[in-house]
Image (cartoon, helix red, strand yellow):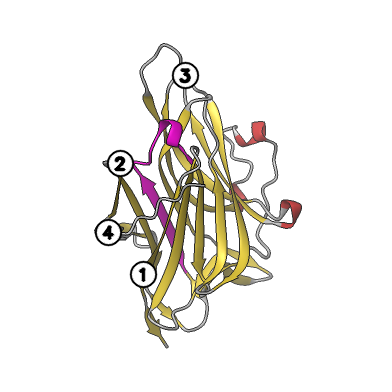
Amino acid sequence: MRKRWISTLAIGAALSVFLAGGAAAHKPTIIKESNLPMFLNGSFNPTKLPKKLAPVHLTLIGSELPVGPAALKEAIFEIDKNVAFNAKGLAVCRPRLPELAIALDPCKKTRVGKGEMEFEIELPETPPFTEKSHMVAYNGGKPGGVRTIFAVGYLPNPISATVVIRIEVTKIDHGRYGTKLVATIPSIAGSGSMKKFQLELFRRFTYRGKRRSYLLARCTDGKLQVGWKAVFADGSDFVESFKRPCTPQP
């Protein structure tokens, strides 16, 4: 497999402050590959965290991704070992695909996040066009023994497609990293390519009378780190990582 190592990558961030209803942003990451800039962002919120695990929000963003033959096939994230996923006691979404497409949202109680997705579509005898959709992330439990998130969106006419991105969450022991997320990006209408995604993971819920959080983090040394690998349909990839400062709190 041909590797594309981006040595000049300058990682930035986009912070979404959900509880306050506002947003703040750092300078975005710009990756220049074949004169085609890509933008990558990632952040944790809040940045002031105790040395014990506490609720946190994680945002991952990719935009202006290559389309066509070099479409994004997999997005792989390795998350800092000071971040933990906790779905114990949270309801599990296991409906069939047609059930996911209905407006009543049968998996509402299993939501673990939200986001946006954008695809570039090319149909026979028509110029390429863009389709956008909101995205909802659901706790998929452990089918096959692997913790899973289903990120679901709906593309309107003329595509009329339900898009399901399967994200597998596994524990790893890889230096700074303790959790891996592998998102498999489906093809759309045979020639659709993901151009942009934004995924925000967060959820508070109650289990056995106690308030819990789907995502937790702690700050032990003033930083949290994420490794990123993008795998494209032509077999190429690029690998990088970014660090986010955090402030230890009593």
Q: Which mark is residue 244?
A: 1
Of the two numbered discs 1 and 4 in the rendering, the one whose residue sits closer to the viewer? 1
Which label's residue is closer to the chain start, 3 or 1?
Answer: 3
Say which residue label 4 marks.
Answer: 25
* Image marks 1 and 4: residues in contact by CB distance under 8 Å: no
Question: Spatial distance from mark 2 to mark 4, Cα to Cα?
Answer: 27 Å
Question: What is the residue that sits farthest to the right in this orientation?
Answer: 144
Residue 98 or residue 172, whichever sits in front = 172
* Image marks 2 and 1: residues in contact by CB distance under 8 Å: no
Q: Amino acid at mark 4?
A: Ala
User: Measured along the vertical axis of the image, is residue 154 above or below residue 246?
Assistant: above
Which label's residue is closer to the chain start, 2 or 3?
Answer: 2
Say which residue label 2 marks.
Answer: 34
Number of residues whose C-alpha sits closer than 10 Å to that of mark 3, classed few (under 14), some (14–19) or many (20 or more): few
Q: Amino acid at mark 3?
A: Pro
Residue 18 or residue 137, whichever sits in front = 137
